[in-house]
Amino acid sequence: MAEREIVFLPDPVLRRKARKVTDFGKDTQQLINDMVETMRAAPGVGLAAPQVGISQKVIVIEFGDEEDEDAPLKLYIVINPEIIRASNEMVDAVEACLSVPGLVGDVERHECVVVKGVNRFGKPLKKKVRGWLARIFQHEVDHIDGIVFTDRAERVWKPEETEIYADV
Ligand code: NI
């Protein structure tokens, strides 16, 4: 495994629609492993392939349970992710992004979404997620579509040093 370099705005790869993954061979497995390592090293709770300069539909997320601090972290790897259902209920929270250093913003997201895609070996998967996990999924799927959180933020600002937020 190897850590990869994270790219920042205004790198055009962050604005491109990523390509669908059709080959689940060695290169894709290596990319996934590297993305997990890069996310952990950052540290962040999610990463999309365009953030390491690769325009492919791959996202990785590692997140625990927002209601139980002692719950173990869970790793999610979704290839060709798509949000197929979203709740009408929206929630506002402060977001940040590893590719947009030094800025945070208020972003409204669906409280609950259903994500469809395939796992790292190409087997279909579907997940219903809510709360922060749903927010992270929406943020990463946006990266796949060339969208960054500042596009959706009602306002953005430079965070205070004491401000707590998660990078994705
Ligand atoms: Ni991000």
Image: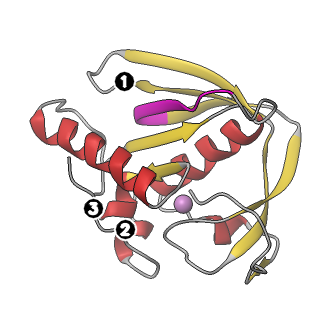
Disc 2 is placed on an element classified as loop
Whole-number angstrom distance, CA of label 1 to CA of label 3: 21 Å
Who is closer to the viewer here, 109 or 157? 157
Q: Which residues are magenta?
A: 71-81
Disc 1 is placed on an element classified as loop
Classify 99 as above or below 43.
Answer: below
Which percent across, then down, holds residue 95?
Answer: 71, 61
Query: Label 3 near label 2: C-beta < 8 Å?
Result: yes
Q: Could you tell whether 11 is left or right of 111 in the image?
A: left
Position of the C terminus by quadrant = bottom right
Whole-number angstrom distance, CA of label 1 to CA of label 2: 23 Å
Circle 2 crowding by C-alpha within 10 Å: few under 14, some 14–19, many from 20: some
The quarter of the image that holds ligand 1 is bottom right
Mark 1 or mark 3: which comes first in sequence?
3
Residue labelled 2 has its Cβ within 8 Å of some atom of ligand 1: no
Who is closer to the viewer here, 45 or 161? 161
Residue 92 painted magenta: no
Residue under numbered circle 3: 4
Residue under numbered circle 2: 6
Q: Could you tell whether 64 is left or right of 161 in the image?
A: left
Q: Could you tell whether 97 is left or right of 48 in the image?
A: right
